[in-house]
Image (tube, helix red, strand yellow):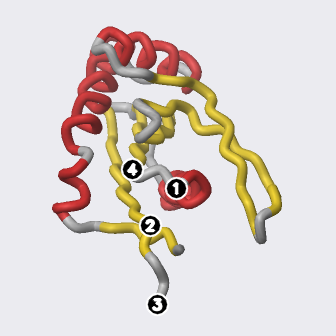
Amino acid sequence: MKLERVQTLEAALEYKDLTEQIIGCAYRVYNRMGFGFLESVYEKCLLIELRKLGLEAKAQQPIIVHYEAEAVGEFVADVLVEDTVIVELKSVRTLTTAHEVQLVNYLKATGKPVGLLLNFGVNSVEVRRRVARLRRET
């Protein structure tokens, strides 16, 4: 099976409600906290907001990378929501391609269907959504 990034509207809509709830929580955190805190502060605030909505949210979730059925590395995702959405948090002036690649690699390593990259930036929350799906190679 190969994990493929999907940019179709149909795939993104499948997780629209959940990702919009998460994004709304991020905006609530930003509106109260503003820019300039460490990612760990935003993470704790976001967990509070997610749990207020009744969403299951786990912080600092380990991701084990496998190659040929052997563990070859381990990373940590900032937040996992409803065992479905990987949320990677940043607190930088501008997101880079490297930040997006990190999220895509987390999706590959876990097989999770959707990820959000949330940057608590200078002027606002910056959001990047990535949706993936497993498909059989032919």
Residue identified by numbered label 1: 111
Badges 1 and 2: C-beta atoms under 8 Å apart?
A: yes
Answer few, some or many: residues within 10 Å of disc 1's Cα (few below 14, many 20 plus, some between 14 and 19). some
In the structure shown, which secondary structural element does the residue marked by tag 1 occupy?
A: loop
**Residue 78 percent location from the top left of the image:** 56, 33
- Whole-angstrom CA distance, mark 3 to mark 1, is 19 Å
Q: Earlier in the sequence, mark 3 or mark 1?
A: 1
Disc 3 marks which amino acid? Thr
Q: Which numbered marker is on residue 138?
A: 3
Q: Quadrant of residue 72?
A: bottom right
Q: Earlier in the sequence, mark 4 or mark 3?
A: 4
Q: Which numbered marker is on residue 129?
A: none
Q: Which numbered marker is on residue 114?
A: 4
- Whole-angstrom CA distance, mark 4 to mark 1, is 9 Å
Badges 2 and 3: C-beta atoms under 8 Å apart?
A: no
Q: Earlier in the sequence, mark 4 or mark 2?
A: 4
Q: Is residue 108 left or right of residue 71?
A: left
Q: Earlier in the sequence, mark 1 or mark 2?
A: 1
- Whole-angstrom CA distance, mark 2 to mark 3, is 13 Å
**Residue 62 percent location from the top left of the image:** 68, 37
Residue identified by numbered label 2: 134
